[in-house]
Image (cartoon, helix red, strand yellow):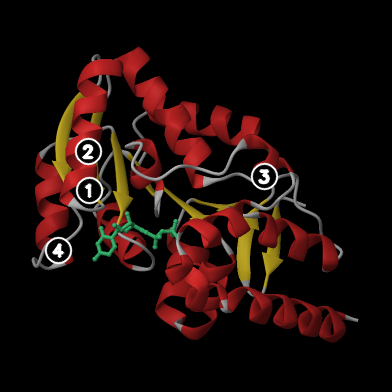
């Protein structure tokens, strides 16, 4: 199956390698490409917000399963997805690719100190990247104004780390304007890439406990994580309805 629906969100059923190959093809031909990496929280908020659901199912070019919760849900529903494809893994791979190919990169999102730390890291470790924009995510301008600024910079890659659905709403404007770039919302990835927030150690990731690690590090996430058990309840309900 090329698409797998989890609570109404249509995920692309591809391995990480398949996504890489397709994205490279689209970068080579400068196709306007909008990638959403959707976790259970995004699936739940799309169910509460029809406009957001429309962005995921009709306007995005790819929706990847970001998080083990989505992969587990697909399995429970009897339509398994190939594997988890996280925003952070795609983002770090694309940054390496951008460095190898001297691509034009626009970054928008996260706190000012995070974006400054990323600028320093790029200058040191990714010096062949052409950084055509590095803006923090605490702006007051309308998304249309911000989108216009991004378009004027003529980037090849745009990464937005504003949280959902705002990051997807921004990229949706750019995609509708046919900006010939690869665009992806990356949530908290800038915080991790900057070194200011640590990603869970490999053992935790392999044990599928990354979410628990994040909860221990940032107890304020507790309230948001309340959505995950609700997500699982909805998945079981949807399984019953499918029978
Ligand atoms: N953020 C932002 N502007 C805001 C609110 C949040 O740039 O008005 C940033 C925040 O600093 C963080 C990112 O958005 O770097 C998303 O964080 P979150 O923890 O929500 O990401 P996720 O859980 O989706 O990985």
**Closer mark to the observer between disc 3 and disc 1:** 3
- Between residues 9 and 115, which one lies in front from this camera angle? 115
Q: Residue at x 20, y 56 (%)?
A: 137
Q: Give the CA separation, mark 2 to mark 1.
A: 7 Å
Mark identifier at residue 106:
2
Where on the image, by quarter, is ligand 1?
bottom left
Q: What is the secondary structure assignment of the residue under circle 3?
A: helix
- Mark 4 or mark 1, whichever is nearer to me: 1
Query: Which residue occupies the foreground of this view, 38 or 192?
Result: 192
Q: Residue at x 32, y 60 (%)?
A: 167
Q: Secondary structure at mark 1?
A: strand
Disc number placed over residue 84 in the picture, else none: none
Which residue is tagged 4?
144
Q: Are marks 2 and 4 in contact (CB under 8 Å)?
A: no
Q: CA distance from mark 4 to mark 3?
A: 40 Å
Q: CA distance from mark 4 to mark 1?
A: 14 Å
Quadrant of the rendered structure where residue 200 is?
top right
Spot occupied by residue 172 in the image (x, y as percentages of width and height): 32, 60
Closer to viewer: mark 2 or mark 3: 3
Is 240 drawn above or below residue 145 in the view shown? below
Instruction: Determine whether label 2 and label 1 are within 8 Å by CB.
Output: yes
Query: Residue placed at 72% from the left, 56% from the top?
Result: 71
- Of the residues under marks 4 and 1, which one precedes in the sequence? 1
Q: Residue at x 48, y 51 (%)?
A: 61
């Amino acid at each position: 199956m090329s698409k797998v629906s989890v609570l109404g969100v249509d995920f692309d059923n591809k391995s990480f390698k398949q996504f890489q190959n397709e994205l490279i093809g689209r970068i080579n031909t400068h196709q306007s490409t909008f990638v959403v990496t959707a976790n259970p929280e995004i699936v739940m908020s799309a169910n509460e917000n029809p406009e957001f659901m429309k962005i995921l199912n009709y306007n995005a070019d790819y929706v990847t399963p970001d998080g083990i919760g989505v992969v587990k849900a697909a399995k429970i529903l009897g339509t398994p997805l190939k594997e988890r494809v996280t925003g952070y893994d795609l983002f770090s791979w694309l940054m390496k690719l951008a460095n190898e190919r001297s691509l034009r990169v626009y970054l928008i999102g996260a706190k000012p100190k995070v974006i400054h730390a990323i600028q320093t890291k790029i200058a040191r470790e990714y010096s062949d990247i052409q950084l055509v924009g590095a803006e923090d995510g605490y702006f007051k301008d309308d998304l249309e104004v911000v989108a216009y600024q991004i378009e004027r910079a003529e980037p090849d890659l745009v990464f937005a780390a504003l949280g959902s659905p705002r990051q997807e709403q921004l990229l949706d404007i750019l995609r509708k304007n046919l900006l010939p770039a690869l665009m992806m919302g990356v949530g908290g990835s800038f915080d991790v890439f900057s070194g200011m927030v640590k990603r869970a150690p490999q053992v935790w990731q392999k044990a599928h406990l990354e979410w628990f690690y994040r909860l221990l590090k940032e107890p304020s996430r507790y309230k948001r994580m309340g959505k995950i058990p609700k997500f699982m309840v909805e998945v079981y309900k949807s399984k019953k309805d499918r029978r």
